[in-house]
Image: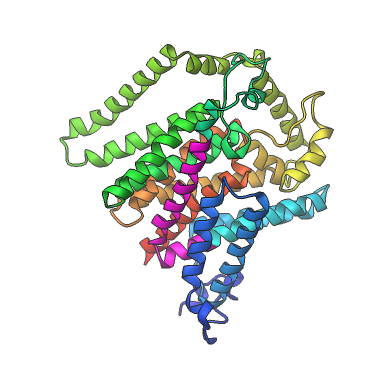
Amino acid sequence: MSAPTIPLLLRWQGSLQHARSGALGRRLTLVAGLVLCALMAGLPLVTRSGLSLLVLASGLLWLLIALRTPPGPLGEIDSWILAILALALLATGFSPVPLAAAKGLVKLVSYLGVYALMRQLLSTAPIWWDRIVAALLAGELVTSVIGIRQLYADTGELARWADPNSVADGTVRIYSTLENPNLLAGYLLPVLPLALVGLLRWPGLARKLFALTALVLGLAALVLTYSRGAWMGLVSQAGVTILMLAIRGTRTWPPLWRKLAPLLLLLGGAALLVVLVTQVEPLRVRVMSLLAGREDSSNNFRINVWLAALDMIQARPWLGIGPGNDAFNQIYPLFQQPKFNALSAYSIPLELAVEAGIPGLLAGIGLLVASLRTATGLWRGDGFFSLPALAVIAVIAGLGVQGLTDTIFFRPEVQLSGWFCVATLAAGATHARA
């Protein structure tokens, strides 16, 4: 009776479920969990070659597990992900630089292999959510300490990130192991809400101290990157988290106070933010650079890249140029303004439209809406995935705001954390349907 509900695309799954199991077969869940923990802990610490090996191992493990596990019906999130993959495949086939686009397609498939393994593991053994988060916090803690220590070392290397043509000239920005302050900030941004949820839900003083330390040091390191996009994302995360916790905490209060408490908290947070910006000079200088328009070199650079990206979308609006930065690097010079080289569109919506056209952008928006709908549904409940759903909503808010003016999200150090959040929601939805 259940066979008609299984999509044809997934009928191959479970074909080896009756095969004899060896020692590895009996321990696939443990092996998958350990590989994912190693991957998430090593995001900012392992070389790109090492990350590639861990990503490849994750994909192969998912194939082994999928061959032994009967498939279930596709959820809303999975359907949108398959739509994105299908559009990427079409965009690659019709790309003006198909070989370069094929490299981007391979990267996308490899990341989706990690997502699939995470989703499978969290669906069958939810306890691994806390273990993967603990591994992620361990890597973040080491990275934050290294970054903060750079303030006390030779500032000669740090000076290379000080733009003499910027309003914020002279600002010292840390970059830790990632060699780029914006990338460090993008990596830290999704980790902070996960650390907060760990602090709220983990039992025992030692675990709570571990989560609190990771949260505080990660927050300090993010601020010291002086990444304006990440700062705005952090404010968005804080606002969303405070609002949702206030709504949850005041459910039994009288109706008037239930409405006023979240508003008063947000107003208090906004007042504190205004005080910090007006009284702390480095923050004030960095925020004022946002209002400098083209007079700030970073703003001027992004505006010129965005205009070129719009021209690229207008030239190929339906299937774009194909996925990946290699395809972008080959096509962008045909549209760029003189002296404004770029490696990406510096905006997630523009990047999606450049790579896969307007349909690709709509599919990305569809995944975003489906994720938010699933997350709010899980948050309203009191199940295992309720607090993780809160973290995911905050991560979406933070990365979404940062992604309006940057494409750091497409780097593996950030993107894999994002796919972990999406896998959390997909696994939570599976448990909710069970």
Give the percent coordinates (x, y) of residue 162: 64, 21
Question: Residue at the front extreme?
Answer: 153
Asked whether residue 233 appears in the rendered view, the answer is no
Q: Is residue 21 above or below residue 346?
A: below
Residue segment shown in magenta: 117-146
- Dominant secondary structure (helix, strand or loop) of the stretch shown in magenta: helix
Q: Residue at x 52, y 52 (%)?
A: 40
Q: Is residue 328 above or below residue 233?
A: below
Horizontal arrangement in the rendering, residue 283 relative to residue 412 (left or right): left
Give the percent coordinates (x, y) of residue 89: 71, 56
Question: Residue at the left extreme?
Answer: 254
Q: Is residue 427 above or below residue 213?
A: below
- Is 125 within the magenta? yes
Front-most of 177 and 104?
Answer: 177
Front-most of 202 and 94?
Answer: 202
Q: Residue at x 58, y 71 (%)?
A: 10
